[in-house]
Image (cartoon, rainbow, N blue to C red):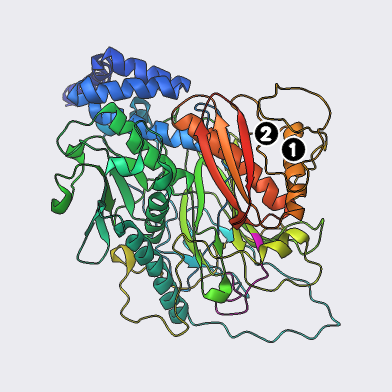
């Protein structure tokens, strides 16, 4: 009996060993069967040379083995995300800084968090992802069921807690002057009233932007039975010039498209290039498609929601647009967001994250609101922590920015929030000014990234002692980007839900679990004042500061930048400050800011846009120039500069 048992055990061990050998052999065989072009593309990707990798992956998609195309498509999406996360220069770390927005809340238990199912590693993931699947963490990311509302409650409550790790909100405690009478108590709105109003306003954002798209006859929209879009078809000539550069007239269409995406909560968007429906997309069409995804990423849409698919066989398109000649955006609902990054080489400069707001300015007196969305995706190294803060503007010169909301967590997260700039939602408007959103995340290797967005709150009167920059901003008008407005009366009771499910679960405070200490002061570092203005066509010099522009001078003024950099040098800051001083006496001229960057393609365009945005930010933040006076453009050229022109009002 003993001999028989030993023989059985040895046979089982031998079979197990043969199985492991077979699996290892199959994995090695799969790697060896990759074409030379695919191996080169993966090598360039892992080195961070995204341009070289992109060209080779596209070559595989157009002329390579059909079995390798899904894998090449996955890598192209990873490259697009990495290029946008790094700001402008592929393979290098950096944060994007764009103006943006705010948040929401619930009393009832949040919906359970979900993790997207793992994909087939041999077809839809980079090769190194297969080895990580077996040891991937089992926890689920916190995915709230709907937008929240900043209501400033007395005590924080739990919102979408993570199974293993908590998240936190710390309410702002304001000091009261004992000599002044206590403010009247504001009755908290009911959850149902807030929920109904938010649904109405978010739906208004969707409806208004859909109408803007339909103003262009060539754009086709397929609407489902629930009133939500199934797909949007946009002819390529409407958006692009002969190459991959957007036309100037494309901005209203892209802005309307961005508003629709924000209003559809966590719906996912799959972008198909022209020619996909007939199985013949060109390389130029693929690059143009990635231009649209880059626009959505730069607007703050989460990378987990946007995907470029260059293979029509993987996407089910509506019958009405089956043979459409143009770019297709297909909307996918009720699918869990994938908030776990499997590729080790995907991001080596910290966690992948996003922060955005739509619109970036609002007036509480006109019943306007803004949708904010932020996400943090867990990197292969693991996610240590993240923190979201909403900072109200300081009321006196030199005062630190005051935190309005403070949320921390330690797991992957996607939040979409609604903010109307009022206390307790239906209470008094908050002071006018420039509010700042800050998102910071740190991975397990102690690598951190930070994103900033701003939202301009107008309409409310400023208290005494308000700085010049905040006082000027109160006259800013509502943006023409389809802001949702609700009538004075209650919102319609029969308003349909967005995305096939309720848009908001209920009013609730921001995520809470652990009480944290006072937020650190958000002081901006002082910068040296030495600088000079660069005249048009002049060579770079290190001379002293140039004289300030004369009052009424219209430019152009040129601000030089170092190659592949968006950082304002001390000399450049002086030029911007001189322009700001000139604008202090010129209250009517509009400011046209054009960013330039050497090279072609998405990288140069993104760098040029960031340079122009940094100049505009300094004019608004330091010199109080109202945002509505500023127009930002970007251009890929043979110069590393920003050009500023003042245009007299008609």
Image quadrant holding the N terminus, namely top left
Q: Which residue is mark 1?
A: 575
Residue 632 x, y percent position in the rendering:
55, 45
Q: For mark 1, give the secondary structure.
A: helix
At 39% from the left and 46% from the top, the residue drawn is: 250
Work out how far the residue at label 2 is from the one at label 1, CA to CA, in angstroms: 7 Å
Of the pair 59 and 508, the residue shown nearer to us: 59
Badge 1 crowding class, 10 Å Cα cut-off, few under 14, some 14 to 19, many 20 or more, is many
Do callouts 2 and 1 mark residues in contact (Cβ within 8 Å)?
Answer: yes
The residue located at (77%, 66%) in the rendering is: 466
Q: Is residue 121 visible?
A: no
Q: Nearer the viewer, residue 505 or 131?
A: 505
The secondary structure making up most of the magenta span is loop
Q: Is residue 50 visible?
A: yes
Q: Is residue 198 left or right of residue 402?
A: left
Q: Which mark is residue 559?
A: 2
**In this view, 552 is above or below 425:** above
Res 334 quadrant in image: bottom left
Q: At x 79% / y 23%, what residue is drawn? A: 542
Lateral position of residue 28 relative to residue 426, left or right: left
Residues rendered magenta in the picture:
421-434
The answer to which of 479 and 262 lies nearer the viewer is 479
Q: Quadrant of residue 615?
A: top right
Residue at the (35%, 21%) spot, across then down? 55
């Amino acid at each position: 009996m003993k001999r028989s048992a030993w023989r059985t055990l040895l046979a089982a061990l031998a079979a197990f060993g043969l199985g492991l050998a077979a699996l290892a052999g199959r994995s090695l065989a799969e790697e060896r069967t990759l074409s030379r072009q695919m191996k080169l593309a993966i090598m360039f990707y892992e080195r961070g040379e995204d341009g070289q990798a992109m060209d080779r992956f596209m070559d595989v998609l157009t002329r390579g083995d059909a079995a390798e195309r899904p894998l090449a498509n996955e890598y192209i999406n990873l490259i697009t995300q990495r290029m946008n996360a790094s700001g402008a220069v592929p393979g290098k770390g950096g944060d994007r800084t764009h103006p943006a927005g705010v948040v929401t809340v619930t009393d009832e238990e949040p919906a359970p968090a979900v993790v997207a199912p793992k994909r087939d590693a041999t077809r839809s993931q980079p090769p190194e992802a297969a080895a990580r699947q077996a040891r991937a963490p089992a926890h689920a990311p916190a995915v709230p069921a709907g937008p929240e509302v900043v209501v400033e409650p007395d005590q924080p409550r739990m919102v979408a807690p993570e199974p293993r790790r908590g998240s936190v909100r710390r309410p702002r405690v304001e000091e009261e002057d004992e000599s002044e009478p206590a403010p009247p108590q504001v009755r908290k709105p009911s959850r149902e009233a807030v929920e109904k109003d938010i649904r109405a306003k978010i739906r208004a954002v969707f409806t208004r932007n859909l109408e803007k798209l339909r103003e262009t006859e060539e754009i086709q929209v397929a609407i489902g039975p629930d009133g939500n879009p199934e797909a949007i078809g946009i002819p390529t000539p409407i958006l692009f010039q002969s190459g991959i550069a957007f036309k100037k007239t494309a901005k209203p269409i892209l802005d309307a498209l961005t508003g629709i995406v924000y209003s559809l909560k966590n719906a996912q968007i799959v972008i198909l290039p022209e020619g996909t429906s007939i199985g013949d997309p060109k390389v130029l069409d693929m690059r143009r498609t990635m231009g649209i995804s880059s626009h959505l990423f730069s607007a703050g849409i989460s990378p987990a929601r946007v995907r470029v698919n260059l293979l029509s066989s993987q996407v089910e398109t509506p019958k009405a647009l089956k043979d459409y000649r143009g770019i297709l955006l297909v909307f996918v609902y009720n699918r869990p967001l994938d908030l776990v990054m499997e590729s080790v080489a995907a991001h080596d400069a910290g966690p992948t994250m996003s922060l955005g707001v739509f619109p970036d300015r609002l007036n509480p007196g006109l019943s306007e609101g803004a949708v904010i969305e932020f996400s943090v995706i867990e990197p292969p190294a693991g996610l240590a922590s993240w923190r979201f803060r909403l900072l109200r503007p300081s009321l006196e010169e030199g005062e630190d920015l005051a935190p309005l909301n403070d949320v921390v967590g330690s797991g992957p997260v996607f939040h979409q929030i609604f903010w109307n700039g009022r206390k307790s939602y239906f209470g008094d408007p908050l002071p006018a000014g420039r509010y700042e959103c800050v998102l910071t995340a740190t991975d397990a290797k102690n690598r951190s990234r930070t994103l900033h967005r701003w939202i301009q709150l107008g309409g409310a009167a400023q208290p005494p002692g308000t700085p010049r920059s905040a006082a000027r901003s109160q006259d800013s008008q509502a943006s023409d980007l389809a802001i949702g407005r609700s009538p004075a009366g209650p919102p319609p009771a029969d308003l349909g839900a967005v995305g096939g499910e309720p848009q908001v679960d209920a009013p609730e405070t921001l995520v809470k679990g652990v009480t944290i200490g006072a937020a650190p002061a958000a002081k901006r570092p002082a910068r040296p004042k030495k600088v000079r203005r660069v005249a048009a066509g002049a060579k770079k010099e290190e001379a002293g500061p140039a004289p300030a522009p004369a009052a009424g001078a219209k430019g152009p003024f040129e601000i030089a930048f170092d190659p592949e950099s968006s950082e304002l040098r001390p000399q450049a800051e002086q030029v911007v400050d001189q322009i700001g001083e000139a604008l202090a006496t010129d209250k009517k001229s509009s400011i046209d800011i054009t960013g330039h960057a050497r090279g072609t393609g998405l990288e140069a365009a993104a760098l040029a846009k960031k340079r122009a945005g940094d100049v505009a930010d300094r004019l608004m933040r330091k010199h109080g120039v109202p945002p509505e006076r500023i127009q930002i453009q970007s251009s890929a050229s043979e110069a590393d500069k920003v050009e500023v022109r003042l245009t007299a009002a008609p």
